[in-house]
Image: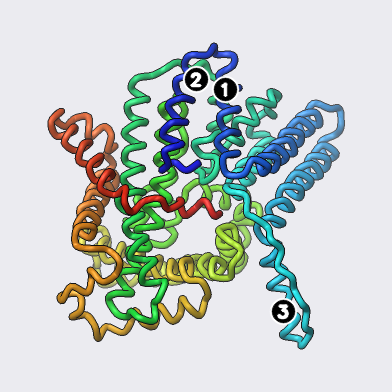
Amino acid sequence: MLFNSMEFLIFFPVVLLIYFIVPQKIKNLWLLISSYYFYMCWNAKYALLLLFSTLVTYTSGLCMEMIKQSRYNRVRKITYKKIIVAGSFTLNLLLLFYFKYFNFALDVLGRVLRIVHIELNVPVFDIILPVGISFYIFQALSYTMDVYRDEIYAEKNFFRYALFVSFFPQLVAGPIERSKNLLKQFSEHRKFNANMARDGLLLMLWGYFLKLVIADRCAVLVNTVYGDFAAYHGFQIIIANVLFAFQIYCDFMGYSIIATGAAKVLGFRLMNNFEQPYLAQSVKQFWRRWHISLSSWLRDYLYIPLGGNRKGRVKKYRNLLITFLISGLWHGANITFVIWGGLHGIYQICEDIVSPYADRFYERFRIDTQNFSWKCIRVVKTFILTDIAWVFFRADTPMAALRILKRSAELSNSGLLLKGGLYQLGLDEKNISILVIALSALLFSSIIRESGRDVLQWLKRQSIIFRFALYWGAVLLITLSLDITGQEFIYFQF
């Protein structure tokens, strides 16, 4: 069931209405049933995988809690807890490996053997990737680690814990919630809150705007160019590359905001997954703002356990590179994703090496790096670097990505844009105009948030005429976008 489907527009009001009608003691049970139904709309049998991950991590939490309360000495307690954590991680990651990486691993094995002149007839297994498996497994594993670290007590109520893993707004594409935030909310007494419901519906409207008006339009142009990139070059490729950056941003942020809004209508607060990443002034800052739930997960459960920056600069860079290579692999079983992650790791290593020299240069020549123009230069530089990496994320193969980058440097056809060449990339004049207006609205809202103001609070202070004109304008643009919608959210494949 997609958020941008008629089924969800029926499903969500029904779930909401019944949730606030039924007694408090069965509210969680109703949400759990609704969440499993939501997931089973894709493939009912894969709900068993969700249940398996839930059972493994729930049991591991209880076992660790029992060990904490036992009379074993401290060393034995730590040893037994590590064994349980290892078992929980092994079972969950084996599940993830089989469905997401098994064919990829066989392909890599075959390529390696060919290098040493060993031919291996590698079969390709017909394995369907369960939607959202990377998200809910990472969320469940974070619970295991939090219990191990004594950051939370193990949840004894199975249905409450199962709801934490399967909560439908963020089940299939995040944000990847932490037990310290979401799990405890299921223990709270919950009544309908008109203010939260209004704010949640406005967030959902904004999420649909980002997905249907911006992301899906960008997708038409991007798919046109990337589908036959040999027929395009210069500014046509550059425009496609830039619009892919906005496509994936608005597509994924749109999902996250719809999820946050839907949860808020129900009375729950999910973490913010994006903070104006394209206004970041460095790649390091970009990753503090992009897919925050994943980047913080990798920091807390991979980078820091590897040693973080505590064991010298060389090991710090090793840990950074490992973390970002795994981040790339998390996104998909393709070498292009690994390269994308590796590029971001290399970017950050280079920034860290250059930073001390750059600071001395600025100080010596008295360059004010806090002025507006200098910040703009750094924002543009960061965007260009991330956009180059996005080409590998979008391309089918590394060689295709390199050819796309090469053709983008051929600027001999710049005059085509002035002769209507922009309208030959899949979008007509009307849709290009709508896209420009929508991107302007995105930039405006980003600037408001970057200034430290809450957009919803800013809206509430405006006149009722302005607010309703804005809301109905968004509805109108969404309506005008219905003829080009129907595309799945990009992050469903991860």
Q: Along the horizontal axis of the image, is 176 left or right of 238? A: right
Does 267 appear above or below 107? above
Say what secondary structure mark 3 lies in: helix
Which residue is pictured at 37% across the width and 58% down the height?
Answer: 247
**Residues at badges 3 and 2 in contact (C-beta under 8 Å)?**
no
Q: Label 3 to label 2, Cα distance in Å?
A: 54 Å
Q: Secondary structure at mark 2?
A: helix
**Residue mark closest to the camera, 3 vs 2:** 2
Tell me if residue 460 comes above or below residue 87 in the rendering. Answer: above
Quarter of the image where one finds residue 337: bottom right
Q: Position of residue 375 (x, y in %)?
A: 27, 61
Q: Are marks 1 and 2 in contact (CB under 8 Å)?
A: yes
In the picture of the structure, the residue carrying the numbered disc 2 is 19
Horizontal placement of 58 versus 138: left or right?
right
The count of marks equals 3
Question: Which of pointers 1 and 3 lies earlier in the amino acid sequence?
Answer: 1
